[in-house]
Each structure stands twice: as structure tokens, then as C-alpha cells.
């Protein structure tokens, strides 16, 4: 996203331009506000789909990464890292997405690999919101949107309008996929027996939490109605799936001493994923209300 600065200041893009720029004849990713435009009403709740870690290809085809943290104190904090072709850091960005005047504004500063800044000490770039849509935020000359609105967690697209003498708008477009998650470590060490006992304890806690979250989803009044029956059926179907899947993992490793550990790790991981799905579907609200139960973290 170094192109953001280049686009707004008119600096030459050099060899990076053919790699990232896309000429658009009809539709464009970015939007430009009219003179003295007013930003629409918007809140950070409408851009929660940005939260996560994203990875893609950036300048000159080198890797680029972007990440956004959940809202805290009326601000979402983001970072962008552009690598060089040799794997070193070319530059980074520090970004604030804030609520201002009943709308949103994106502010950012650039830093070299040695942490020296591009902007003046108190300077920054500010992009005011032009339009807001489900899974898309259009700032003045800069767009952030879901790669697939029907699957918000799969990836994001970042686009910036460049200054150009060409008649058609010129844009730089970055496409990011969801970054691969880091494998969970359960901190179980020692002999095979000790590892198995440790993992068995974690699995027991994981299943206990599953039951607690499903019970909370059902609620005393929902237990006997149609929705309650469907939730129970879904939970039972998951139990059957977990058994079949992790039994297959055991079968694959049955000749090795880690067969039990592999079965337990599979069971813990799937149980945690299911519990999080239950929480997301039945124990949270669409507004800013506190969830019925805390968001479940990986079992330990």
C-alpha cells in the first residue's frame, strides 16, 4: 500500500506500476468524493469484517501482509508490511480506523525498515469515508472491501486511485487471502503416557465447555421447541462427525506411538471449532450488546 502515498502525491511508480496497477475501462474499485462532500453515517461495527490477518502479493510481486485488531476505544488499529524480493522489510504502515463526526476516517503513517518515518513527526495521511456498504468501505480514493461478500473471512481487497494523465482512472489493487493460522500448541510434553494424559485432560475440558455453550444456546424455554430440537440435532450430528473424522485419523496413525495423541488433538480442535460456531450463531447479538457467554478460546 505504498502506492497510497504515490497516488496522492503524484510520485513516479517506476517498475512497481506494471505489477499492481489495473486499468479499468468501466467500473472502478475506488470512489472520489465531490468537492466538500459529507461523509455518511457509519460506525466501526460495520467494518468488523476487516479484523484478522491477511496475506497476498504486493509491490514487484513480493509478499505483503495486512492485519486489523478488533475495535478498542473507538479505534481499530491496523498494520501493513511490504517485503522486498529478498524477504527483508521494504516498509510498513501503521493505520487507525476511527469514528469521527458520526462517520469513519482512515489515518496512516509510513515507516522504513529502520523505523524512520516518511511523514513529518505529527503528519499523517487521512482518508474520509465516501460510502459504506455491507462488506465494503469506500474512502476518498481508497477502498477496503471483502473479496467475497458472501464469505467475509476469505479475503479482502485494497485499492487506491492514482494520479494519472490518462483519460481512464488508474488504480493499484492489492488482493489478500486469509493468512494461514498458526498451529495450536497444547503445552503437553514428556513421555508418550504423560502427553496422552495431558491431552486427555484438555479434551475433557473442551467437551465440558461444548456442553455448557450448547445448553446456553438452548436455554430453558427453547429446549422443547422446534429451534431447540434443531440445535440438539446439529450438536448430535457434530458428535458423530467428530468421532468419524478423528477415528480416521487414529486409523491413519495406528502403527505409531502417537496414534492416541493424534486422535486427541483432532478431537480437541474440532470440539473447539464447534463450540465457537455455537457461540457465534446463538450466543451473540447483531448489535453491540455483550454476548451471553464469552467468546471461547482454544482449550488449554
Image: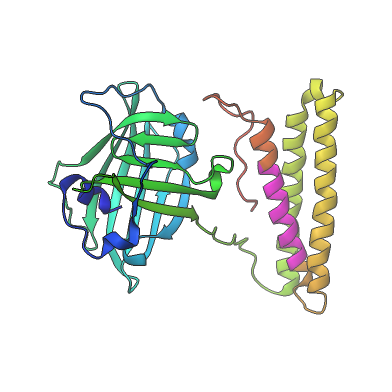
Residue farthest to the left, as pictured: 120
Res 71 visible? no
Q: Which residues are magenta?
A: 262-276
Question: Could you say which is closer to the camera, residue 155 or residue 93?
Answer: 155
At 60% from the left edge and 29% from the top edge, which residue is drawn?
A: 291
Relative image position of residue 28 (x, y in whole percent): 37, 42
Residue at image x 76%, y 36%? 214
Left or right: where does residue 75 sit relative to residue 52?
A: left
Image point (78%, 78%), residue name: 256
Q: Residue at x 64, y 36 (%)?
A: 280
- The reply to whether residue 18 is visible in this rendering is yes
Q: How many marks?
A: 0
Q: Is 23 inside the magenta-drawn segment?
A: no
Residue 43 place in picture, x, y as percent: 41, 26
Query: In the displayed structure, does residue 201 sit left or right of residue 99?
Result: right
Q: Main secondary structure of the magenta part?
A: helix
Q: Position of residue 267 (x, y in %)?
A: 75, 57
Residue 293 lies in what quarter of the image?
A: top right
Return the residue found at the far bottom: 255
Q: Is residue 271 located in the magenta-colored stretch of the structure?
A: yes
In front: 28, or 144? 28
Q: How is the image coloured?
A: rainbow
Image coordinates of residue 57 in percent, x first then y, are: 40, 61
Where 157 falls versus 41 (above or below)? below
Amino acid at each position: 500500500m505504498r502506492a497510497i502515498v504515490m497516488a496522492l502525491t503524484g510520485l513516479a511508480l517506476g517498475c512497481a506500476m506494471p505489477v499492481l496497477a489495473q486499468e479499468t475501462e468501466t467500473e472502478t474499485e475506488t470512489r472520489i468524493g465531490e468537492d466538500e462532500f459529507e461523509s455518511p453515517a457509519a460506525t466501526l461495527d460495520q467494518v468488523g469484517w476487516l479484523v484478522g490477518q491477511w496475506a497476498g502479493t504486493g509491490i514487484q510481486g513480493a509478499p505483503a501482509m495486512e492485519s486489523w485488531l478488533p475495535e478498542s476505544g473507538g479505534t481499530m488499529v491496523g498494520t501493513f508490511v511490504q517485503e522486498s524480493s529478498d524477504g527483508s522489510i521494504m516498509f510498513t504502515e501503521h493505520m487507525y480506523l476511527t469514528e469521527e463526526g458520526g462517520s469513519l476516517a482512515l489515518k496512516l503513517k509510513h515507516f522504513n525498515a529502520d523505523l524512520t518515518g516518511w511523514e513529518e513527526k505529527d503528519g499523517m495521511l487521512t482518508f474520509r469515508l465516501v460510502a459504506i456498504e455491507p462488506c465494503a468501505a469506500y474512502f476518498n480514493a481508497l477502498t477496503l472491501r471483502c473479496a467475497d461478500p458472501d464469505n467475509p473471512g476469505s479475503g479482502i481487497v485494497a485499492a487506491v486511485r492514482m494520479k494519472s494523465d490518462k483519460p481512464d482512472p488508474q488504480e493499484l489493487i492489492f488482493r489478500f487471502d486469509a493468512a494461514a493460522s498458526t498451529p495450536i500448541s497444547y503445552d503437553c510434553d514428556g513421555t508418550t503416557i504423560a502427553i496422552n494424559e495431558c491431552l486427555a485432560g484438555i479434551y475433557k475440558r473442551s467437551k465440558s465447555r461444548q456442553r455448557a455453550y450448547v445448553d446456553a444456546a438452548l436455554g430453558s424455554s427453547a429446549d422443547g421447541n422446534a429451534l431447540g430440537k434443531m440445535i440438539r440435532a446439529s450438536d448430535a450430528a457434530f458428535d458423530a462427525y467428530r468421532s468419524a473424522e478423528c477415528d480416521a485419523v487414529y486409523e491413519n496413525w495406528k502403527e505409531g506411538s502417537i496414534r492416541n495423541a493424534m486422535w486427541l488433538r483432532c478431537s480437541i480442535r474440532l470440539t473447539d471449532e464447534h463450540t465457537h460456531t455455537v457461540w457465534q450463531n446463538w450466543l451473540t447479538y447483531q448489535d453491540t450488546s455483550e454476548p451471553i457467554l464469552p467468546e471461547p478460546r482454544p482449550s488449554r
